[in-house]
Image: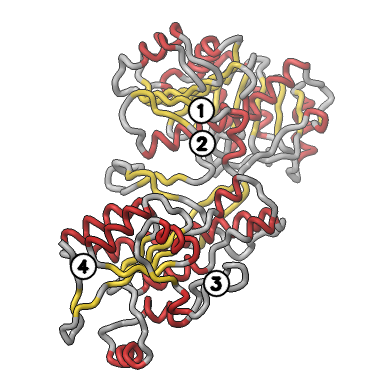
Amino acid sequence: MNYSRKTENGVNMKKRALISVWNKDKLIEFAQDLTEKYNYEIIATGSTFDLLKENNIKAVEISEITGNRQLINGKVKTLYPDVFAGILADTTNEKEKEDIDNKKIKLFDMVVVNFYPFEEAVNKKVDDTELTNTIDIGGPSMLRAAAKNCRRVLAVSSPEQYKEVLADLEEHKGETSLDLRRKFALKVFEKTLDFDTKILHELSDRFEEDSENYFSLNIKKAKQLRYGENPHQKAGIYYTNNTIDYEVLNGKELSYNNILDAAACTNILSEFYDVSGCVIIKHNTPCGAALGKDVEEAWKKALDCDPLSAFGGIVGFTQTVKDNLAKQLTAMFLEVIIAPDYTSGALEILKQKKNLRVIKLNTSLQEYKNYISEEIRITPFGTLVQDSDKGELDKDKFKVVTKVKPTAEMVEDMIFAWKIAKHAKSNAIVIAKDFKTLGIGQGQTSRVDAFEIALNRACDASKDAVAASDGFFPAIDNIQVAAQGRIAAIIQPGGSIKDEEVINTANKYNIAMITTGIRHFRH
């Protein structure tokens, strides 16, 4: 059945669709249904008109409205008052109805547009001239106009929407529903925001200019989560262009807290991408970490640091999980396991626990650090944006500030402990030996308290171990606590007004000390 509309005076009149698309997928079938089944008149531009004509679909070239098929090499085809008047006109407004009648404005009921392939050009790394040629002007303008006037006009911004449009026309006897027009209007503003954001970010990089007065995240909602940190909090997960590639191979859907913990775990794993390592996370903080001859040995060493906290935790590995390790992991309750890969046997063993979430990292740990460049926190005082903490240690720039010099083995343990302290909550103290955390004190308002907690975890194992602090020591009491735990060496940023007293106290107790000049607060 063909549908047509009636004007107020009862004269039959076709509806009009303005079509100007770069991506011509599914267009022929869609245009045929619009003209043959729903009696639409199509107004088309440039190559879109040519394609429709080649396929024997009746269409009117936009030049019949504008007086010009195109100007300046096709850059101007639709940017004309008569085109936008036909999109924006409000037929319920008496003043505008007079303009429509007196100026014989052709109304558009549907605008079908998609944008130039800017993102594709970015990915191809084309030169600046070719890139800026893909910055669409007319397309976003027409869609925004249609979306603004969604009380009357349907804005179609993707070939994926064609099927829904046709179903809506069929259901409403040739008319589009207000619900669909509103829904598609929101999609338009999502797309234009996304398009403009990509342009801003890419040109800022190319022109080597910071967008100092504007910060945006190009994020798209992937899914609604069951809840946030607590059941009464709504939450969702959104993906950006810098979302890593990963797979969930087993278990329940990842929760809000699972995702936070998985990120915290992988952040630390990426510090040790080229060795066999294991990290255990609980409540977004490390409770055990170690390196070993293989990841199975690393797991045993990491678990030994704090087996009680590891219960119900998140465990990550820098290398493939094999069968024997998988058996050990299933012997206790864990929420999530993360690794670059799993043997087929290990995966079968892990899958025996149907609720255990098993994540495979497809993005390499070496590349992982490149995926986060900013950290954002929203507060009532304003939104804070900072560079992510990528401060790295340089052994050649260490300052040994004490008379006692650390051994080469101590230095390696200090570097290991320092990398863990970087990811622990401030105030943070990490005690380690033989590439194994012995005790971690973190999240304390007093650094002395953090030191004592770490020593209590380590017990007698702290003898001849090293300690790392995320911040400088403001007083000598920390060194006195370290001496009681028989700590052999300390690595810390330095920079306190009491550095001299701290160093002298370390000398008094024959504790070697290195200062780095790099602080790693994590609030």
Query: Which residue is denoted by mark 1 in the rendering?
Result: 362
Closer to the camera, 468 or 37?
Answer: 37
Query: Which residue is denoted by mark 2 in the rendering?
Result: 244
Could you tell which of marks 1 and 3 lies nearer the N-terminus?
3
Residue, far top: 324
Residue at screen point 74% across, 21% down: 411
Closer to the camera, 158 or 494?
Answer: 158
Query: Which residue is denoted by mark 4 in the rendering?
Result: 175
Amino acid type of the residue that numbered disc 3 sits on in the rendered structure: Gln
Amino acid type of the residue that numbered disc 1 sits on in the rendered structure: Asn
Rounded to the nearest whole Å, what is the CA distance between mark 1 and mark 3? 47 Å
Rounded to the nearest whole Å, what is the CA distance between mark 2 and mark 3? 43 Å
Query: Which residue is denoted by mark 3 in the rendering?
Result: 70
Cβ–Cβ below 8 Å for labels 2 and 1?
yes
Q: Position of residue 401 (x, y in %)?
A: 82, 31
Taking the image as shown, residue 37 lies to the left or right of residue 308, namely: left
Amino acid type of the residue that numbered disc 4 sits on in the rendered structure: Glu
Residue at screen point 43% across, 29% down: 247
Q: Position of residue 128 (x, y in %)?
A: 69, 56
Question: Secondary structure under badge 4?
Answer: loop
Cβ–Cβ below 8 Å for labels 2 and 4?
no
